[in-house]
Image (cartoon, rainbow, N blue to C red):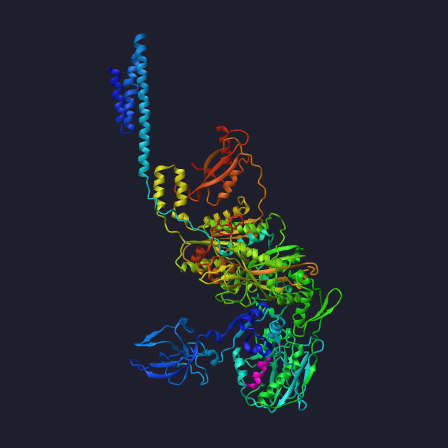
Amino acid sequence: MKFPLSWLKDHLETDADAETIADKLTAIGLEVESVEDAGARLKDFVVAKVLTADQHPNADRLHVCKVDAGGKEPLQIVCGAPNARAGIKVVLARPGVVIPVSGEALKVGTIRGVESFGMMCSGRELELSDDHDGIIELPEDAVVGQPVATALGLTDAVIDISITPNRGDCTSVWGVARDLAAAGLGKLKTPKEEAVAGKFPSPKSVALNFPSDQKQPCPLFAGRIIRGVKNGPSPAWVQERLKAIGLRPINALVDVTNLVSHDRGRPLHVFDADKLQGNVQARFAKAGEKLLALDGKTYELDGEMCVIADEAAAHSIAGVMGGEDTGSTETTVNVFVESAWFQPISVAATGRKLQLNSDARYRFERGVDPEFVVPGLELATKLILEWCGGEPSDIVVTGAVPEWKREIPFAPEIVERIGGLKIGKDRIAEILTHLGFALKDCGAGWLVMPPSWRSDIDGAADLVEEVVRIYGLEHVPSVPMSRPHAIARSVLTPTQKRRRIIRRALAGRGFNETVTYSFIPRADAALFGGGDDLRQVANPIATDMDAMRPTPLPSLLAAAKRNQARGFNDFNLFEIGAGFQTGVPGGQQTIAAGIRVGEPKPYWADQKLLTFAARNYDPGFVRSLSEITNPIKRVPDVFAVKADVLAALEAAMGSAMTAPIKATAPARYHPGRSGSLALGPKVLAVFGELHPAIVAAFDLTGPVAAFELILEAIPDSKAKKTNFAPSPYQAVERDFAFVVNTSVTADELVKAAKTAERNLVESVAVFDLYEGKGVPEGKKSLALTVRLQPKDKTLTDAEIEAVAAKIVASVAKATGGTLRA
Amino acid sequence: MTDTQTLEKDILAGIAAAADEAALEAVRVAALGKKGTISELLKTLGAMSPDERKVNGPAFNGLRDRVQQAIAAKKSELEAAALNARLASERVDITLPVRPEAMGSVHPVSQVLDEVVAIFADLGFAVAEGPDIEFDDYNFTKLNTPPDHPARQMQDTFYMVPQADGSRHVLRTQTSAVQVRTMLVEKPPIRIISPGRTYRCDSDATHSPMFHQIEGLVVDETTHLGHLKWTLEEFLKAFFEIDNVELRARPSYFPFTEPSLEWDMRCDRSGGQIKFGTGNDWLEIFGSGMVNPRVLENCGIDSSKFQGYAFGGGIDRLAMLKYGIPDIRSFFESDLRWLRAYGFAALDIPTLDGGLSR
């Protein structure tokens, strides 16, 4: 809310300057957004008089002026303004003064060979207007040498404050003044409104027509007729005031309502009485009833909205906006002035449903003073009579002032208990009394009755706030909290720890973590098993941010596309975030999703190192080196992301993941190059190369492999390490190559080898896969290294051979595999 | 010079002259092989008289031993030379780049959250979490913001489409809903922080429709505004890793707290960078207040016995301030250049003992 300082001083007797007032406002909870002080901004500009204005010797459109700025000698100034002429009074900037529009300090200049010792300013140069056709001409009576602010009438600072929703009482200049006075910054001097005697009975009656079994949206309705008014512009001071707070003066009758609304927080409505048929009533709208409001839009109302109507139709949306058809115009002669009290909740609901904001709604839904309904009407009457003449009727009133009196039990000790501030009882009483609260002793403490304008106060905690905000929050001391344990204990849950570890494990594997919006385009969601109605945001901020994503994967793919557009072709991204399985609370999973995108460029050393290694080292080393270095193997394939999933799980669980890998994954993955990990029915992770259709849908270049890890599905890690007892006997490794049908999986082979002799086989590793020349069609060769670890004696050659035979037999039985010749 | 001496001299010269292992082997065979000169010499001992043998035995054996030693020494020398030659041939340009490895990073939001958690964990605050899609009741009503309360307009809320049963859920506008969830199941004393994603229909240079909040909640029998002030001061000192923090409280309004306060931190914005603890500017940093007794009652906590404070602020905002990141919207754009510039190394784990940042 904005107001000029002078307006505030109509209500508040104070010598405080704008800065002091602004600081106090912020300190008591009426936060100052800005103080616009044009006078202060222009303090270096002075009034000057142009003595002579001669043609510039070297330029047709320039003048060389002699200007009196109150100094001993006139100044020489070169000026290009067409209106620069002898005799006028102007705004002068001397060298060194900063010109608002440019932000630069003025220098002594030489213009076409003539020196210039200052500048005469236009409205635009001072940011006072858009006028740049000529320099400002000040009134004749402006005093040479004085600051221009006085001459321009800019002595007034305009303060803009933000009002929190609980402070309906401060939605007027009067209310702000009242709070400042209570805070000790001056004395409230607002006159009490006097009744204006009616000259005749009101020809229109008012009625409240609501079903008696419902909460009355309008408990009090008052009005009066004023006849014979002459509408026209409101007085200049009123127009200035309205302009200062950003309102457009319309005509006297409308300006009265705006002035009273902003000055006193009392919204009113003025009807053209000649356009009303019969008597006036407040009632619920009829379902579907339409009303053309003052904003030029037609609103369709429902049966829960309160309207002001005549005997024919609704003419005002109660507490929100009046109707166009019955509004006052330049030709209005007889008016009906309405002043009513509407239930905040009713006004708020109506405004929300119609998506209609107005100054009246703003005030009514925050609660206007119920005791100021009739005084507000009297004030409006007085102003209309002053500005437009006319003759008032008696006031007609129906209903009653809604009950606002209530007593709140309050023990002053609570101020220290809640606020941590030691404030004397007397001081507490003084603060509350100044704010308009009535205190009554009741033995244990007080019964406190808030004033009629403080509908927000409903408990002891509110009173504590009132006391501490006026006493001053700067007095709140810093008091150390106790420590629940002398030395801090761990606070994270296993899930939280796992999330943290997985994040850093993935970052350690070369993934850049990102965070993306939880809402994505519906079409994208549909590709990932989402996009149904129930997961839609009803009011998305943009049409392509309307669906709660089923997994972070589509967000990552969209991000990948953007990065490819920036020229990145080979990168890894991950996000740990929600995937929404339903549209209800709790229907979400925490998913660590990652993507490996694009083929890395070949590395200079890949081939060279291989040749070099082949020359010097053993074949086993060469083979493993080729696994690492061969550029083809570094393409993001299913095994790269399988490794990511296993590494992340191992990091999170503290031990290797033993859940079996299944060759099934959602349709977004390549059907032959994807898999999943599950514990029972609980899917832990899915991974694989992306389905080409998905890659195409996101317009991505190159191969993309991805994984999704569901954090809630990860089992708790086994907390304790078991006793470690290494065997003292020599372990033995033996390699086997089996020829099996291509349909046999590596897992089956490993399992068969493992179970051949459980007591001896410590581990089985696959180290080679071969299909092609030398292996029959439909078959493949899989090579295993089996590590035997005896626990009670060293194995003899014969025993090793016996185990080897058992392994071969077990594999043959389980898979039909035979040793490769 | 005896014959033996001449022989020894010749053989040693041969060893010394051997250019490689093959040449050395040839010298060895010529001297010590079955038909070698020294082997032949040793064979003559058998036919000698005991007196001759007494003189020639040690001489011949000595000769053999010296030659053997010389060969062994030369062999080592040749091997070392061969190795040196091989190593020399294996020399690479060490300035060539290493095999590319992708450098991963942790997002500033995650990093700052870890920092915040480390600080509050030291004071015994647990980390409470809740869903992004929230019941209207938990996000608003239980927090003392019934439908059509003007405070609902303070937060531009995203609503989900109505479910089959007509219920209309919201994308939580604040993580205070998590406080409700905690209070509904836990008995005081409660100390939690609740971090997470929050949503408001708002987007411009300083707003993003999604952002991250951290809220704190303490409920016990004695905690008051003074404790709140101390907590925020100590947090800010620890978080910004500075010794001096000055806070200013302003009365404000939040439906779920009473009294409600906003906290500004003294700062200096001159010179393009923000400095804390000095200067004449104030930076809004936390909203807060004493938990409204109505909220406690709504969550089944006896407000005549228990009280406490709640506060909240933006994680993204804390990250922006601490690490000088200019635009909140850039947090969610996944620009690799940004992620790499502002991200943190995997092992930059914030701890109180090791420091929150490098």
Where does the image place residue B202, in percent across and percent down from the top left? 52, 67
- Residue A279, placed above or below residue A26: below
Left or right: residue B218 versus residue A50 is right
Percent position of residue A594, x then y: 48, 53
Q: Residue at x 35, y 81 (%)?
A: A65
Q: Please count the marks in the image.
A: 0
Viewer-proximal residue, A561 or A144? A144
- Of the pair B71 and A179, the residue shown nearer to us: A179
A259 part of magenta stretch:
yes
Which part of the image, by quadrant, shows the C terminus of chain A?
top left
Relative depth, front residue between B201 and A660 = B201
Percent coordinates x, y for residue B229 in the rendering: 59, 59
Which x, y percent locates residue A86?
38, 85
Q: Residue furthest left?
A: B1
* Magenta span of residues: A251-261
Left or right side of A471 for B270: left
Q: Residue at x 64, y 55 (%)?
A: B190
Whether residue A350 is visible to the viewer of this picture, yes or no, is no
Q: Does the magenta stretch include residue B227?
A: no
A495 left or right of A73?
Answer: right
Say whether residue B108 is visible.
Answer: yes
Q: Is residue A258 above or below residue A496?
A: below
**Residue nearest the observer in this picture, A664 or A27:** A27
Main SS category, magenta section:
helix
Asked where in the image residue B130 lies, by quadrant, the reply is bottom right
Is A176 situated above or below A391? above
In the rendered image, the quadrant that contains the N terminus of chain A is bottom right
